[in-house]
């Protein structure tokens, strides 16, 4: 099924010619839909709108919108004329948005009106409100040719930065097409599939797994504004969904909502026979970002009759690098096997280790990103001896299944969102009452991990947990902010004075144990 499309414009136009009257995109929010042909024309109109606003090949266009058909149209409009789409996390606060847009050197921002208040007080490039595709109706459906090739950059997506500031990850046309092909072939998607996008389109999961894969497979996709446990099964039924992208938190929320509904019905009518929502069309849920607890996976599959197919990947690998087989041959607890790229486990000397031995996961292949935007040092560090070093610690078993055991960095994964503590640490140090601080991830039943801060106050200073949390909320996206603050006498340090976050994890796990008593207040 491998296509030889050289770029994303070519792929879309080929599919539009092949599937002219087939519906490509459904907008769940308002019932609109676009055939492949109609979608291609809408993209051309939007691309001409960008061109009229002086966007040229190689320019960056930032996108700040909720999940919507317009978001997907905007992506392809950028790609049609060789511009780079820069999706901006809509959960960010104004200063964070200003950094991402400014650092990417975007010349234009497409924004939905619901974010207008957020961006009013920050310095941004030219802005166009893109609430409705209708704003492009006055632009031509005929689009001038642009010379494009597979190595042209298509996306600059910002990943949480280990050094405190996010890094712009550059993905090419080849990266996106390759990953769409890998996912399509591994999971067996074809023109009969209908995928649901409920993951945010500012993440590569939604772009690659349920949008680009749909296009590659000549399938259909349904975009929903956001995940809703209350409406989820209604959407699955109404649109006859065959698969959807998710994170473990979503699966747990669906289980909790199902339990609530069952309890309410039984209270109203103790003799009621409550039927679990199940779909005849739904084949499996694709899940990534963080491992699904085995018990959650078991309960979800038993309750809803829907397989959960776990995978692994990063923005730097476009999205997915591995998936479990889409059948009963899965390995629970494993992130699966490579779906097209090479994947190995290296020791600290970049030598491959034996099966079963822990080491760093490294990747190589046509879906691996080009590098970090204007950050040669970070790119050089990430690519060593021709392999991309993920920073994740894992192992491979004798049958070729991979397992992620730990992270080399201190990164926290909260409900699918990556958080690097350094950014929060640096903000806490700016508080007038704080002498030193360190943030770690702690276990959470719903989100997998939550953010906890350990704080040492200056002599004579006084500040409450609530005040510190609110201080963070004024500057950072809410999901990054500490949910608990522990006031301690000191923070464990190494011989060089480095804060030992691993010791803080142990301190949290046994916060009243005598070994760490000297650090407690």
Image: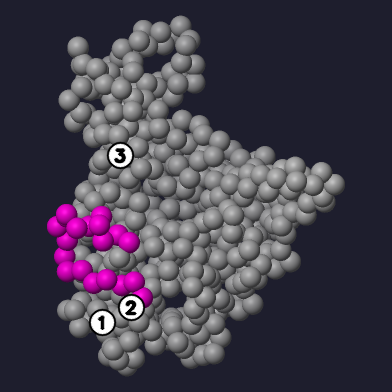
* Residue 126 is one of the magenta-drawn residues: yes
The answer to whether residue 124 of the structure is visible from this angle is yes
Q: Position of residue 444 (x, y in %)?
A: 51, 34
User: In front of the other: label 3 or label 2?
Assistant: 3
Q: Residues at badges 3 and 1 in contact (C-beta under 8 Å)?
A: no
From the viewer's perspective, is residue 270 above or below residue 87? above
Q: Quadrant of residue 244?
A: bottom right
Quickly name the residue at label 2. Answer: 77
Q: CA distance from mark 3 to mark 1?
A: 36 Å
- Give the residue drawn at x 60%, y 65%: 235
> Gap between marks 3 and 2, in whole Å?
34 Å
Cα gap from disc 2 to disc 1, whole angstroms:
9 Å
- The percent position of residue 267, horizontal first and vertical second, equals 75, 42
Pick whichever, 226 or 35, lies toward us.
Answer: 226
- The structure residue drawn at horizontal position 71% and vertical position 63%, both measured from the top left corner, is 279
Image mark for residue 239: none
Q: Report the span colored magenta.
A: 114-132
Q: Earlier in the sequence, mark 3 or mark 1?
A: 1
Q: Which residue is mark 1?
A: 49
2 and 1 marks in contact (CB < 8 Å): yes
Q: Quadrant of the C terminus?
A: top left
Pinpoint residue 431: horizontal percent, then vertical percent.
Answer: 20, 28
Residue under label 3: 473
């Amino acid at each position: 099924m491998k296509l030889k499309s050289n770029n994303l414009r070519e792929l879309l136009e080929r599919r539009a010619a092949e599937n002219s009257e087939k519906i490509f995109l459904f907008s769940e929010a308002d019932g609109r839909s676009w055939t492949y042909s109609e979608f291609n024309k809408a993209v051309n109109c939007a691309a001409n709108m960008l061109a009229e606003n002086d966007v040229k090949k190689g320019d960056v266009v930032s996108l700040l919108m909720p999940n919507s058909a317009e978001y997907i149209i905007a992506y392809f409009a950028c790609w049609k004329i060789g511009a780079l789409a820069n999706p901006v996390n809509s959960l960010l606060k104004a200063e964070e948005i200003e950094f991402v847009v400014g650092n990417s050197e975007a010349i234009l921002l497409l924004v939905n009106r619901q974010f207008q208040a957020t961006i009013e007080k920050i310095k941004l490039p030219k802005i166009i409100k893109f609430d409705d595709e209708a704003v492009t109706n006055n632009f031509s459906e005929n689009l001038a040719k642009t010379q494009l090739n597979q190595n042209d950059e298509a996306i600059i997506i910002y990943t949480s930065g280990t050094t405190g500031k996010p890094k712009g990850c550059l993905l090419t046309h080849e990266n996106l097409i390759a990953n769409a092909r890998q996912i399509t072939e591994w999971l067996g998607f074809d023109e009969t599939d209908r995928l649901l996008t409920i993951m945010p389109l500012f993440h590569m999961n939604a772009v690659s797994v349920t949008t680009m894969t749909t296009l590659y497979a000549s399938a259909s996709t349904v975009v929903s504004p956001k995940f809703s446990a209350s409406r989820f099964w209604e959407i699955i039924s109404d649109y006859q969904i065959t698969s959807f992208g998710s994170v473990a938190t979503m699966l747990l929320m669906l289980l909790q909502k199902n339990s609530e509904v069952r309890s309410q019905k039984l209270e109203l009518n103790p003799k009621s026979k409550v039927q679990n929502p199940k779909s005849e069309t739904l084949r499996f849920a694709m899940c990534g970002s963080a491992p699904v607890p085995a018990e959650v996976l078991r309960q979800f599959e038993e309750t809803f009759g829907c397989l959960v197919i776990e995978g692994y990947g990063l923005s730097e690998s476009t999205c997915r690098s591995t998936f479990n087989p889409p059948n009963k041959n899965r390995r629970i607890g494993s992130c699966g096997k490579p779906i097209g790229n090479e994947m190995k486990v290296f020791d600290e000397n970049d030598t491959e280790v034996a099966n079963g031995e822990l080491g760093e996961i490294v990747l190589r292949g046509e879906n691996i990103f080009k590098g970090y935007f204007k950050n040669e040092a970070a790119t050089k560090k990430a690519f060593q001896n021709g392999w991309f070093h993920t920073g994740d610690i894992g192992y491979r078993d004798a049958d070729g299944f991979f397992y992620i055991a730990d992270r080399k960095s201190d990164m926290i994964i909260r409900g699918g969102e990556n958080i690097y503590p350094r950014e929060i640490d640096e903000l806490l140090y700016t508080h007038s009452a704080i002498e030193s601080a360190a943030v770690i991830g702690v276990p959470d039943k719903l989100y997998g991990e939550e953010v906890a801060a350990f704080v040492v106050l200056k002599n004579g200073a006084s500040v409450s947990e609530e005040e510190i949390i609110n201080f963070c909320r004024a500057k950072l996206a809410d999901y990054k902010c500490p949910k608990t603050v522990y006031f301690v006498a000191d923070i464990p340090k190494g011989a060089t004075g480095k804060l030992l976050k691993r010791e803080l994890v142990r301190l949290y796990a046994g916060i009243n144990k005598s070994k760490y008593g000297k650090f407690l207040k």
